[in-house]
Image: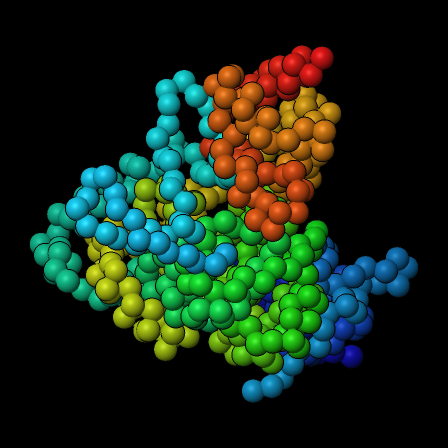
Amino acid sequence: MFPYKTSLKLNKNLKESLYLQLANQFILLIREGNLPPGTKLVGSRTLADLLQVHRKTVVACYEELLLQGWVESIPKKGTFVNKSLPLIQKVTLTNTTKTSKRKNSGFNFYENNCLPEKNTEKREGVMYINDGTSDTRLTPTKEIARIYRKIASKKSVHAFLDYNSTHGNVKLREVLALYLNNSRGLKINKENILITRGSQMGVWLSSQLLLKESDIIVVGETNYSSADITFQYQKAQIKRVSVDENGLVIDQIEKLCKKQPIKAVYVTSHHHHPTTVTLSAERRIHLLNLAQKHNFAIIEDDYDYDFNYNHAPILPLASHDSSENVIYIGSVCKTVAPVFRVGYLVASEDFVNEAAKLRSYVDRQGDALLELTFAEFIKSGDLDRHIRKLMKIYLQRRDLFCKLLKNELGDYFQFEVPKGGMAIWVQLNKQYSWSEVAKEARKHQLEIGEWQRYDLANKKHNAIRIGFASYNDEEIKLLIEKLKQTFKSIKKSAY
């Protein structure tokens, strides 16, 4: 019998719930091969007696493992480690340029056709659909301002007004290392962190260091369009694999590896962008094994880790990475407000140092005072309190949005209620096109946005991503009403 009593240790003094402590320890035991696929777990009553905890704690732990895909429950037989999990391996757009003369310049410069112009101007009275942004009205500006003023008023503040480390403020890196270790299961120190101005800088730096012309990077058939453009800018070859309800289809990546060397895989594992699906536990291990075997990098863009409504956040790939193949990227921009350009790139020390060297020639350093502010904001627990507040509000908004979308527009849209994040993946009835919907919606003071960017592989899936978090209840009702008016107008013009 497996020594559960000596292998599992619970600490009631930690902030983390006992059932999550237990679940994370089970995941570690499974990953390390101590509980191989097919192993039957001890019954909940027996384990509760062994660990001297309430049976409900063990039941909640098993339910969490089941939700994350680590175990399977077989009626009348018990709970088993998922047989589908692979065994852990224990071994060490083409960029085009042209010369053009602009009306307002007296010289020639290079224009890059793969970089689209972004129109950020908004018209008064028009409602804009976004792809999942936070509600800036909920930003804890008072708390942030209070911390900023406190830091700026110190006599020692002058030391931070000069040039400092290109890696980012050392205190923020130390605080982030502790925070990410505790909340996301990473095993890092400050030397593994580079502070960036948002996650997009992390993606850009990674692509600069990993990709040269014709190098292969693998992405999903549906993918975050800004990441695609970043890789195209490097003249890399983008190879696409399918995305289903369990995330990227890793078997297709394995087939690619057998045919030709690949340099990297880009993945939004927690909530795939744009479809919102989660990469399953089985596929996570499979991808990590492939990266280790074929020596490619995994760029893990964990853009909205904090927002989960059905279960606790699934630990990122980086928490299971034992061979330093994962570059983990995140930010506080999505959680707090886009204006606070504070992000991070987490990787091996040598990669972080090289990224810091490169960063110093495009952005000498970040905003030290803002970084110190966020170090205190995180350390004091203000960030966690803010996240808990948002979770309740966004959950309510998700439910309202999905309810109205189904009840009022069910004839036009198909969708699955997302388990987390700030957006819904919505498929339009095939008898309509987004081009006609966007054109008609504009007449009703509604802007659909760049719907084309959701079909990068030209699969004609007729789906886009619609954010719900940034709208309050009245705005959600107004958005649904504008969509209803749009489709009524389209139906009238068809007759």
Query: Image quadrant of residue 464?
Result: top right
**Looking at the picture, does residue 72 appear above or below residue 191?**
above
Give the number of marks: 0
Residue at horizontal 60 percent and vertical 80 percent from the top = 293
Query: Quadrant where the N terminus lies?
Result: bottom right
**Depth order, front residue of 112/257:** 112
Query: Image quadrant of residue 52?
Result: bottom right
Q: What colour-coding does the image apply?
A: rainbow
Residue at horizontal 68 percent and vertical 61 percent from the top = 249
**Depth order, front residue of 373/412:** 412
**Depth order, front residue of 145/16:** 145
In the image, residue 372 lies at what x, y percent?
A: 25, 55
**Looking at the picture, does residue 250 appear above or below residue 322?**
above
In the image, residue 140 lies at what x, y percent?
A: 35, 38
Note whether residue 202 is visible. Answer: no
Note whether residue 214 is visible. Answer: yes
In the image, residue 316 lies at what x, y percent?
A: 54, 62
Residue at horizontal 71 percent and vertical 77 percent from the top = 87
Please state if 243 lies on the left or on the right of 109 as rendered: right
**Looking at the picture, does residue 142 appear above or below residue 252?**
above
**Depth order, front residue of 35/306:** 306
Extreme-right residue of the structure: 76
Query: Quadrant where the C terminus lies?
Result: top right
Please state if 358 lies on the left or on the right of 493 as rendered: left
In the image, residue 44 lies at what x, y percent?
A: 76, 61
**Looking at the picture, does residue 144 appear above or below residue 290?**
above
Please state if 480 lies on the left or on the right of 407 as rendered: left
Residue at horizontal 25 percent and vertical 43 percent from the top = 102
